[in-house]
Image: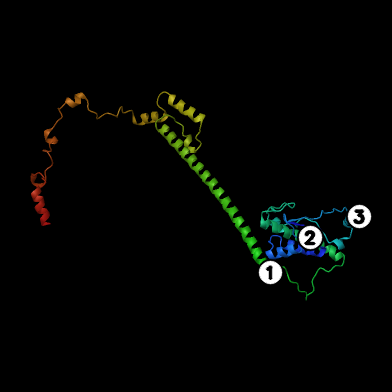
Amino acid sequence: MVIESSSMEPAEEEAQLGQESEDEYSELSDSELQEAFAKGLLKPGMNVLVDKSKKFVNNVDGMKQCLADLRKNLPWVERLDLTNLPAEDILSKAEGKVPALANGEVNADDDFQREMFFYRQAQATVLQALPLLNKHDIATKRPDDYFAEMAKSDQQMQKIRKKLISKQLSLEKSEKAKKLREQRKFGKKVQVEVIQKRQKEKKAMMSAVKKYQKGMTDKLDFLDGDQKTGKDSSDGSKKAMNKKGPNAKRKYKDKKFGFGGKKSGKKWNTKESFNDVSGFRAKVAHAKGGKKGKGGKQNKRPGKSVRKKMKSRS
């Protein structure tokens, strides 16, 4: 069906267009369609609304007038506009902290930082506007009996403030926890390095003591904690090992106590000592020549039956 806008009367056309704008997504009922068909508004075919072509008007004079209105250089009292950066954060500066907002750079995703930027910018605007208003004799204080209904209640603003402060505190706690974890990791790493260094020094000290005891070196520098490491110490140990003859300590002991000869392997059996039985004593070997008790009698252990009787008596 086709609806011709030219065949409609102006009043009926406006009513029909108004109804279509209100019920843009609603379907017409059967009774409304029958009424429209009876009035001759509907014809067989596709139901298409044919609009008139829009006329574009180039109003040059109107555009020039708007441009002239925008270019009016009115005094500041008529405009009351101010453009300024946020006020200086005196509290952070006094505490030695670096201000989070510098030269208007704000992280838009940080709610607390954004609200603090608005707050400090309003502070700077007030500090700049009050002298100008006083200069033009404009009242800036409310009368004592003045009452104004605020858009938001004080309770709601207190809730918002508490929420922003709690969020800021949680962020600070998370940053502190992150720093503590990093410090613990670094401290653990340093502790492991210190322990490894001590173990290495202890090992070097023990090896130096053993070398001194074996006579491979006659230096006592390791007692002062100034033991040389690396190439110098290795060269010194090699020179001590390549030195011929006993060291000073060995010479001093030989001079004091004498040289007793070989001690190790002294009690080992040989073929001759094994075959030599001249020193064998049967009584000593079989305990026949043992010590005797009082009265010249040999101390004997009582028999098993006697020991049982003695045990039962006790």
Q: Quadrant of the N terminus?
A: bottom right
Q: Along the line of sight, which residue is nearer the eye, 176 or 108?
A: 108
Q: Nearer the viewer, mark 1 or mark 3?
A: 3
Please report contact status of discs 1 and 3: CB closer than 8 Å, yes or no: no
Secondary element at image label 2 = helix
- Horizontal side of 163 relative to 37 (left or right) equals left
- The one nearer the camera, 128 or 288, is 128
Residue drawn at (14%, 35%), measured in percent from left and top?
Answer: 285
Q: Are marks 2 and 1 in contact (CB under 8 Å)?
A: no
Q: Position of residue 93 (x, y in %)?
A: 71, 55
Displayed quadrant of residue 19? bottom right
Q: Is residue 152 above or below residue 2?
A: below
**Left of 178 or right of it: where is 153?**
right
Which one is earlier in the sequence, the residue at label 2 or at label 1? 2
Residue visible at 52% across and 44% down in the picture: 189
Looking at the image, which residue is at 51% across and 45% down? 191
Label 1 residue SS? helix
In the rendered structure, which amino acid carries the disc numbered 1?
A: Asp
In this view, the residue in front, 202 or 125, is 125
Determine whether 288 is above or below 122 in the image: above
Instruction: Give amino acid for label 2.
Output: Thr
Residue 185 percent across, percent down from the top left? 53, 46
Residue 305 visible within the image:
yes
Q: Residue 243 at x, y = what percent?
A: 43, 24
Per the image, the residue denoted by label 1 is 154
Q: CA distance from mark 2 to mark 1?
A: 23 Å
Residue at the extreme bottom = 145
Which residue in the protein does label 3 denote? Answer: 61
Q: Quadrant of the C terminus?
A: bottom left
Packing grade of label 1 (10 A; few <14, some 14-19, many >=20) is few
What's the residue type where badge 3 is placed? Asp
Identify the residue under disc 2. Answer: 125
